[in-house]
């Protein structure tokens, strides 16, 4: 799937905040090797590199469009195109960081232990994933895609919620870790614009559905979806939109030996 860096960065402040909240909880001495998985345009990777400026920092993403912007904006960092599900670096990391990326992948019961296996002793896996798949912003996409009008073209894109609950991740990871810190936060984001939630989802949850349709169908599907969104997320008196957004955070530290 193609990514649109400009569309994704429309709400950069809101997207950056959970990454900074995750970074603040990383319990590690200055690391020497850091991987940022699903680095996108590299804004968070750059902050990580500045925070630990003596470390080798590698940003990895599947999208060449996003990496092109990352290389242009942050030329001093190493960028690699790759599939996170096949992450197998030649040098293991002290820190594997992933902000808003792993929810695009299935099979977390094998993905997370695989990522832990690519850490050095005492290393840290720090992950943030959106956890709002039952919210109207997402459910309206799935419901529309499964209506008779759209199911033949879009029904196959509807997938079960990829993020499990906190208990599930704790039970999976605690036997593999010396320390685990896991929490969930709901950010009540104040967005501007006539249909701000539509603009938000265009670069994320809505994107694979729109890319499957021709131009005329895109306009029709978006219009139907936009009408539902305005009912679920009405503009406030000042013209802004309040968009609750839940995110799951996991910080796991492995044994020293």
Image: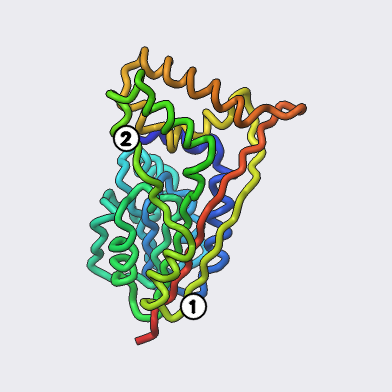
Query: Residue 43: x percent and y percent?
Result: 48, 49
Query: Residue 174: x percent and y percent?
Result: 42, 75
Q: What residue appears at the point 37 percent right and 28 percent down from the top-left corner?
A: 146
Q: Is residue 68 left or right of residue 15?
A: left
Q: In which quarter of the image is residue 36?
A: bottom left
Q: Earlier in the sequence, mark 2 or mark 1?
A: 1
User: Of residues 192 and 247, which is closer to you in this image?
Assistant: 247
Q: Mark 2 points at which residue?
A: 157
Mark 2 vs mark 1, foreground winner is 2
Is residue 179 visible to the viewer in this orientation of the structure?
A: yes
Query: Residue 194: x percent and y percent?
Result: 62, 23
Residue extending farthest top: 216
Q: What residue appears at the point 32 percent right and 42 percent down from the top-left corner?
A: 63
Residue extending farthest bottom: 257
Mark 1 secondary-structure assignment? loop
Task: Specify the quadrant that holds the C terminus.
Answer: bottom left
In the rendered image of this protein, does residue 112 appear above or below residue 196? below
The crowd level at tag 1 (other Cα within 10 Å; few <14, some 14-19, many 20+) is few
Query: Residue 47: x percent and y percent?
Result: 51, 57
Q: Name the residue under label 1.
A: 29
Q: What residue appears at the point 38 percent right and 28 percent down from the top-left corner?
A: 145
């Amino acid at each position: 799937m193609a990514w649109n860096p400009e569309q994704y960065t429309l709400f950069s402040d809101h997207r950056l905040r959970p990454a900074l909240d995750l970074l603040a909880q990383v319990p590690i001495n200055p690391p020497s090797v850091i991987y940022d998985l699903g680095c996108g345009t590299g804004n968070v990777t750059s902050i990580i590199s500045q925070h630990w400026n003596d470390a080798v920092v590698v940003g990895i993403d599947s999208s060449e469009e996003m990496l092109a912007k990352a290389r242009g904006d942050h030329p001093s960092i190493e960028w690699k195109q790759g599939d996170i599900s096949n992450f197998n670096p030649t040098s293991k990391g002290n820190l594997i960081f992933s902000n808003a990326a792993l929810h695009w992948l299935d099979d977390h019961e094998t993905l997370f232990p695989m990522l832990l296996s690519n850490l050095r002793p005492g290393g840290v896996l720090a992950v943030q994933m959106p956890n709002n798949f039952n919210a109207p912003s997402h459910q309206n996409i799935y419901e529309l895609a499964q209506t008779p009008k759209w199911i033949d073209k879009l029904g196959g894109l509807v997938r079960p919620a990829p993020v499990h609950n906190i208990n599930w991740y704790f039970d999976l990871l605690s036997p593999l870790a010396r320390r685990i810190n896991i929490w969930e936060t709901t950010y009540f984001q104040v967005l501007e614009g006539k249909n701000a939630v539509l603009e938000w989802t265009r670069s994320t949850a809505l994107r694979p559905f729109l890319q499957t349709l021709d131009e005329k169908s895109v306009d029709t599907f978006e219009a139907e979806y936009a009408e539902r969104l305005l009912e679920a997320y009405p503009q406030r008196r000042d013209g802004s939109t309040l968009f609750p957004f839940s995110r799951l955070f996991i910080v796991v530290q492995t044994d020293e030996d």
